[in-house]
Image (tube, grey):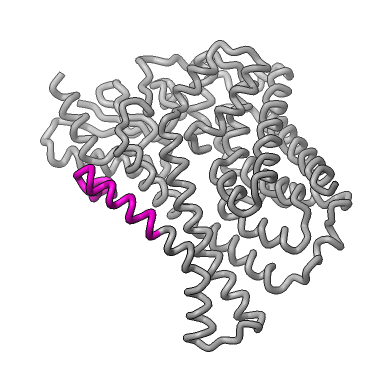
Amino acid sequence: MIIKVLGSGCTNCQNLEKATLEALSGLGLDATVEHVTDPGDIASYGVMRTPALVVDEQVVVSGRVPSSAQVRALLTQASSH
Amino acid sequence: MSLVDHMPVTGRGRGLALTGAGLAWVAAYVLNEHVWDWLLYGAFGLDPSARVTETVHFFLYDTVKITLLLVLIIFLVTVLRSFMSVERTRALLGGKREGLGNVMAAGLGVVTPFCSCSAVPAFIGFVAAGVPIGVTLSFLIASPMVNEIAIGMLLTLFGVKITALYIGTGLLIAIVAGWLLGRMRVEKWVEPFVFETKLRGQTIDPAAGLTFDDRIAMGVEEVGTILRKIWPYLLVGIGLGAVIHGWVPTEFFTTYAGPGSTFGVLVAVGIGVPLYSNAAGIMPLVQALYEKGLPMGTLLAFMMAVVALSLPEMILLRRVLKPQLLAAYVGVVATGIVAVGYLFNAVLAT
């Protein structure tokens, strides 16, 4: 599973990364977390309000920072596909 | 661990927490002045007529008052705006022609939850979806200039008339500036990669599927995020306001920069453009300057210049706009703000 955090380094992007890492720590999934900071790349995902979370090239969160519990639910759902 | 995880789990618990927070807010707002009176003049026995004491009192009182107002305004605005999203705005603007498109874009710029830190992906996203550049610029100009926190603060501090003038003229600048820039055929001044960006996958709408609790939680989070970000600006603004309140002679500015002053607005915009603060930080300063006779038109022009044109946003936008377009953008918006300043002074003086 490839998880991408989209955002150009704003506070909210760091919060999203934190929530994602927290969610991952309890899940035991085989996942890598990457950062996408290039505005062109961010926009190409159709994201217009950072931060955003992309799981296996699918945008799952955009424009807000979810709680780590919400990220955990999203990741569990994504991994069961 | 985010705050959301600490919120009461049951619906009833949340209702109680909200009611409690509301009551605490009202109590704090009502008691604010009395507490400082009692503490400074009663407990510490300071002289209420001494200038230093009065300045300190004003600073403490205003800090609490402005913070309380901000908490309420940010919370309400975030909850209300959680029903809108940049994605919805783009869908509404798609296929709109210039003219009507500029009007809609400016209006949507006010109500769409948007931070200028996302200006670049939003610009690319709009243009890649076929929204004309002038219309996109109307959105990007209106969004910071007609700031919803500023609207709330102006409404509580200065009343309906001034707030309406602020919203009306701010929208007008965004509409006209975006339309003008669109007319100038500025496509050649946009970095080429913007037009090459292909949108893949389906977009998800952040405003969809949120529960009422999610929206409340977002409001609470946003209050914390914004206050953490702006408190230095806020304290500097209130501090300057308190000093002006206590030490600048009444009617000082009337003499040098009254409504009839030729250069007052120009100077205010000249100072405001390079200054970077936010609407909330600037408001206490505006209030103190108004009290000393600076006309409202000049002050609103100053405020608009500070919030609408900022160096950090220009640096971000430089990634998608070539210097010529960036210069035109700043030029057109600054000219609009100056014009509004003079118009305001003329309208409000009569």
Residue B100, position as x, y percentages in the image: 65, 17
Relative to B185, is A80 on the left or the right? left
Task: Let me know if residue B99 is in the magenta part.
Answer: no
Along the viewing direction, whichever of B321 and B339 lies nearer the viewer: B339
User: Is B271 situated above or below B304?
Assistant: below
The residue at the far left in this view is: A28
Where residue B51 sits, quadrant-wise, is bottom right
Q: Position of residue B178 (x, y in %)?
A: 67, 25
Q: Is residue B216 left or right of residue B340?
A: left
Q: Is residue A45 toward the left or the right of residue B293 in the image?
A: left
- Closer to us: A24 or B232: B232
Q: Which residues are magenta?
A: B1-24
User: Residue at 85% of width from left, 50% of height from top?
Assistant: B263
Q: Where residue B274 sits in the image (x, y, percent)?
A: 67, 48
Q: Is residue B266 visible?
A: no
Residue B95 in view of the camera: yes
Q: Residue at x 54, y 25 (%)?
A: B123
Kindly report the secondary structure that dominates the magenta region of the rendered protein: helix
Magenta stretch contains residue B17: yes
Left or right: residue B199 compared with residue B239: left
* Residue shown at the point (65%, 45%) measured from the top left: B160
